[in-house]
Image (cartoon, grey):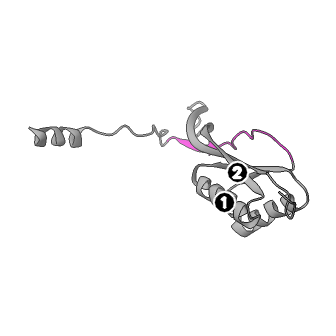
Amino acid sequence: MADENITQKKEEPKKKFKRPNKNYAVKKRLPLRPVEGDNVIFITKKTNFKAQLDKCCDLLTKGEKEIILHGLGAAIQRCCNLALQLEILFSGTYQIEVNTGTVDLVDDLEPLSDDLDFGSQVRHSSSIHIRVFRTAMLGANQ
């Protein structure tokens, strides 16, 4: 009886993300940026990790009380790693606050032939927002 349930589950096709027809070219739009500022950093997989770490360290050593790191999709792991490295480098004077969520991304569908219309599709991507903020001054008496 249990074997029958297993075979039934294997036969059911999984629901996959609906791909556009081969008659369309997909152009991905840039995601909306939540906020702008000098202390807001968007983490990507393409940028060198050491460069991103140096930029964060420069901001924190120049007196910024907090920085906000944003990561989408595959960059979430890198964003978390960067925040943890900052917490270690500044030896407990900074703490992190993490928020996760989902972001809607819009893709434009451009027809490859003249008889088709333009279209768009919405897909979802995981996101993370990490706030790195100062809790104590380095070298201050506690």
Residue ID at (79%, 60%): 56
Farthest-out residue, front: 142
Q: Earlier in the sequence, mark 2 or mark 1?
A: 1
* 6 to the left or right of 39: left
- The reply to whether residue 112 is in sight is no
Examine the structure image and report whether residue 117 is included in the region drawn in magenta: no
Farthest-out residue, bottom: 50
* 65 to the left or right of 101: right
Q: Is residue 65 or residue 126 the one in the foreground?
A: 65
- Disc tally is 2
The location of residue 40, given as percent across then percent down, is 80, 48
The stretch of residues the image draws in magenta is 23-37
> Which amino acid is tagged 1?
Leu
For label 1, the residue is 84
Crowding near the residue tagged with mark 2, few <14, some 14–19, many ≥20 C-alpha atoms within 10 Å? some
C-alpha separation, residue under disc 2 versus residue under disc 1: 8 Å
The location of residue 142, given as percent across then percent down, is 82, 57
Residue ID at (68%, 60%): 82
Residue 96 bears which disc, if any? 2
* Helix, strand or loop: magenta stretch: loop
Residue ID at (91%, 60%): 62
Question: Dots 2 and 1: beta carbons under 8 Å?
Answer: yes
Crowding near the residue tagged with mark 1, few <14, some 14–19, many ≥20 C-alpha atoms within 10 Å? some
Examine the structure image and report whether residue 24 is included in the region drawn in magenta: yes
> Which amino acid is tagged 2?
Ile
Q: What kind of element bears circle 1?
A: helix
- The reply to whether residue 24 is in sight is yes
Q: Is residue 116 or residue 35 the one in the foreground?
A: 35
For the N terminus, give its image quadrant. top left
